[in-house]
Amino acid sequence: MRTYLVTGGAGFIGSNYIHYMFKKYDNEIRIINVDVLTYAGNLENLKDVENRDNYTFIRADICDRDAINKIFEENDIDRVVHFAAESHVDRSIVNPEVFVQTNVLGTATMLNAAKKAWELPDGTFKEGKKFLHVSTDEVYGSLDDDPNAFFYETTPYSPHSPYSASKASSDMLVKAYMDTYKFPANITNCSNNYGPYQFPEKLIPLIINNALAGKDLPVYGDGKNVRDWLYVEDHAKAIDMVQEKGRLFETYNVGGHNEKQNIEIVKTIIDTLKEVLDDSDPRKAHLSYDLIKYVSDRKGHDRRYAIAPDKIKAEIGWEPETMFAEGIKKTIKWYFDNMDWMQNVTSGDYEKYYEKMYSNK
Ligand code: NAD
Ligand code: TYD
């Protein structure tokens, strides 16, 4: 049975990936989820899988060399899927150091531990072992408004925020391991994800949550910055396909051809919520574009991100399956049906879940 070590599996994309993998492979795989549970880690995201015999959660920091080495020593890990990171640009502007710590040094720890466990005496690596580093299109910097300009795998790195600089540094470390040691890895650079279990500091869940509560909807700058939105399940599928069908040592860009201005996103959410809510629902009364509040721009705000997913399509056959109009409806419905999840996150109650479920195991 193939064993996966997933880092950051209690976060947004990691938890969706774990759900996707168990749906696809069921009992054919084993997953060990290593997560230190920062504010962004939420074990409630995984309550549907936590009692499976082929799932294990380990609370550990990816910067903790001894803890990570121990996991490799005690388990025959076949695949690493490395999500764990500090992921929010606004936080990186306020507090950059933790981004360097986790994203750069944590990735170095993961690479070292995997290399140590997988390397043979002759410097080659055990058959079939693979490391996938999950990264972002933000490493490529910013595009202007020319609709024919895209990020390709060959686009030079030009990160602007402390977040994207730390992710770029971690990508460089993975590239260095591949070049120097022929370490068996891939990098994926993905565009903005959306879907269930996303922490409501990111645009889409924040707007859904505020709109339902009748609060202001903050739009940075002129609201015309563009992001290329990818439904998270499509991303999970891409990661699995890259690991199983991709060429080792390659980078694959993963994107949705779903470019939207931020202001379009905010208006779509308001419109969709109005469609979904019953007329008798009191939350419907205050739903209007009047909630939109233009606020000061983010420092160093990248104008436009857009991925050309040509390589992953041609080599692996992956394409985004969920177009934005459908994905945003599914996402809104999910938050709507899971208001308890949102309330636990906004009240901070989710942070007690670990103690309740795991402390006496
Ligand atoms: P997230 O912030 O929701 O989750 C991050 C997870 O990592 C959390 O569970 C957190 O507890 C864990 N973590 C943080 N520091 C850790 C540490 N030191 N040790 C162990 N665990 C730690 O992030 P996300 O949105 O799910 O992003 C996952 C990955 O995908 C990141 O590497 C991010 O850079 C990348 N990415 C995200 C997006 C996006 O739109 N969200 C797009 C492209 C790439
Ligand atoms: P975000 O979800 O933080 O993702 P990223 O910065 O990684 O792209 O932001 C998406 C876009 O939405 C980005 O252009 C910043 C903008 N934004 C707002 O206008 N208002 C907000 O409250 C937030 C959180 C983001």
Image (cartoon, grey):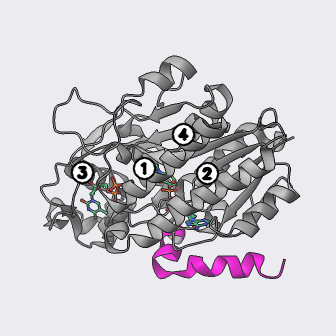
Residue drawn at (27%, 49%), measured in percent from left and top? 265
Numbered label tally? 4
Q: Is mark 3 within 8 Å of ligand 2?
A: yes
Q: Nearer the viewer, mark 3 or mark 4?
A: 4
- Image quadrant in which you'd find residue 226: top left
Give the mark nearest the N terminus, 2 or 4: 2
The percent coordinates of residue 201 (x first, y second) are 38, 67
| Amino acid type of the residue tagged 3 in the rendering | Asp
| Amino acid type of the residue tagged 2 in the rendering | His
- Reading the image, the residue beneath label 2 is 82
- Image quadrant in which you'd find residue 158: top left
Element type where label 3 sits in the image? loop
Q: Which mark is residue 168?
A: 1
Q: Residue 17 vs residue 52: left or right? A: left
- Reading the image, the residue beneath label 3 is 302
Give the mark nearest the N terminus, 3 or 1: 1
- Reading the image, the residue beneath label 4 is 187
Q: Are marks 3 and 1 in contact (CB under 8 Å)?
A: no
- Image quadrant in which you'd find residue 177: top right
Q: Are marks 2 and 3 in contact (CB under 8 Å)?
A: no
Q: Nearer the viewer, mark 3 or mark 1?
A: 1
Q: Is mark 2 within 8 Å of ligand 1?
A: yes
Q: Residue 86 vs residue 89: left or right? A: right
Give the mark nearest the N terminus, 1 or 2: 2
Residue drawn at (49%, 17%), measured in percent from left and top? 314
Stretch of the chain drawn in magenta: 341-361
Give the mark nearest the N terminus, 3 or 4: 4
